[in-house]
Image (tube, coloured by chain):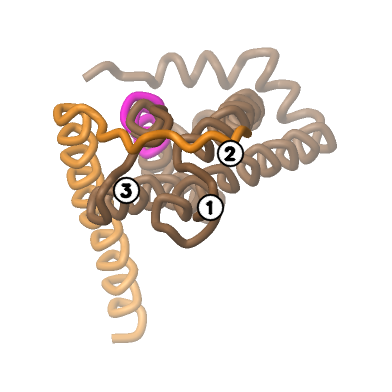
Chain colours: A orange, B brown
Amino acid sequence: MDRSQPHQPVTPPTWRLRLALGCSVAILLALGWFWVEQIRAVLETLALAYG
Amino acid sequence: MVDLLPWFEWFDQSALATAAKAYGGVFVVVQMIHLLGLSLLGGMVLLCDLRLLGLLLRSVPLSAVARETRRYFTIGLLVMITSGIFMSGAVALKLYYSEMYWAKMTALLVGVLFVYLIKFPLLRHPGVELNRVARGLLASASLGLWFTVAATGRWIGFS
């Protein structure tokens, strides 16, 4: 990779940045919900077995 | 919603599935190749996302890291998909009824779309600069997605 010629800083188009941030937040929320549900199911199973 | 059960039943009876069930040695070798593909893909995800978080390769431009990792990410993904189709032939019907299989497929699809339509296009411009929050969100979403793909994939084996 060529590191000899530094590039001028470039800010990506606003719409692309907003799309990326919106998708990232949506993905993080969905993943958070998914893993919380999985942990809740595991805890319920443990409670049934040992509670 | 489209019911994919007939397709899975057909796949379960296919020559590919018969081969996957009949030859345990071949299955194990393909499984190893699948894990190598996952390692390559996971390595590229870690390189790119830890660079986004500013934890490594800080002297290398973000666009260069994204460009270099994209190539091997694609190779890892193709290896995983090809070997994964063969492996799924051995347990096609089990997979259809596995909640974790569908969770993995969903995460995989979203992960591929996110990488090729969102992350790499955003980082491809030489000299691209993102603020700390944007880099953190992008890397967290990517790491979370691929962690989920790997974890749910392993979970299938125990469910």
| Local secondary structure at mark 3 | helix
Q: Which residue is drawn at the image coordinates 53% and 58% (left, top)?
A: B56
Q: Which residue is drawn at the image coordinates 60% and 47% (left, top)?
A: B43
Q: Is residue A15 left or right of residue B64?
A: left
Q: Which residue is nearer to you in this view: B118 or B62?
A: B62
Mark 2 and mark 1 in contact (Cβ < 8 Å)? Answer: yes
How many labels, in total?
3
Front label number (3 vs 2): 2
Q: Is residue B87 left or right of residue B58?
A: right
Q: Which residue is nearer to you in this view: B123 or A1?
A: A1
Name the amino acid, label 1. Answer: Ser
Residue B39's tag is none
Mark 1 and mark 3 in contact (Cβ < 8 Å)? Answer: no
Crowd tier of the residue under label 3, counting other residues whose Cα lies within 10 Å: few below 14, some 14–19, many 20 or above: many
Query: Where does label 3 land, which residue?
Result: B141
Cα distance in 3D space between marks 1 and 2: 9 Å
As for residue B111 lying within the magenta part, the answer is yes
Name the amino acid, label 3. Answer: Ala
Q: Position of residue B119 (x, y in %)?
A: 36, 34
Query: Where does label 2 land, which residue?
Result: A3
Q: Chain of mark 2?
A: A
Q: Is residue B7 left or right of residue A21?
A: right
Residue span colored magenta: B106-118
Q: Position of residue A42 (x, y in %)?
A: 34, 68
Q: Is residue A29 left or right of residue B73?
A: left
Q: Earlier in the sequence, mark 3 or mark 1?
A: 1
Q: Chain of mark 1?
A: B
Name the amino acid, label 2. Answer: Arg
Q: Which residue is drawn at the image coordinates 73% and 37% (left, top)?
A: B33
Q: Position of residue B49 (x, y in %)?
A: 44, 49
Crowd tier of the residue under label 1, counting other residues whose Cα lies within 10 Å: few below 14, some 14–19, many 20 or above: few
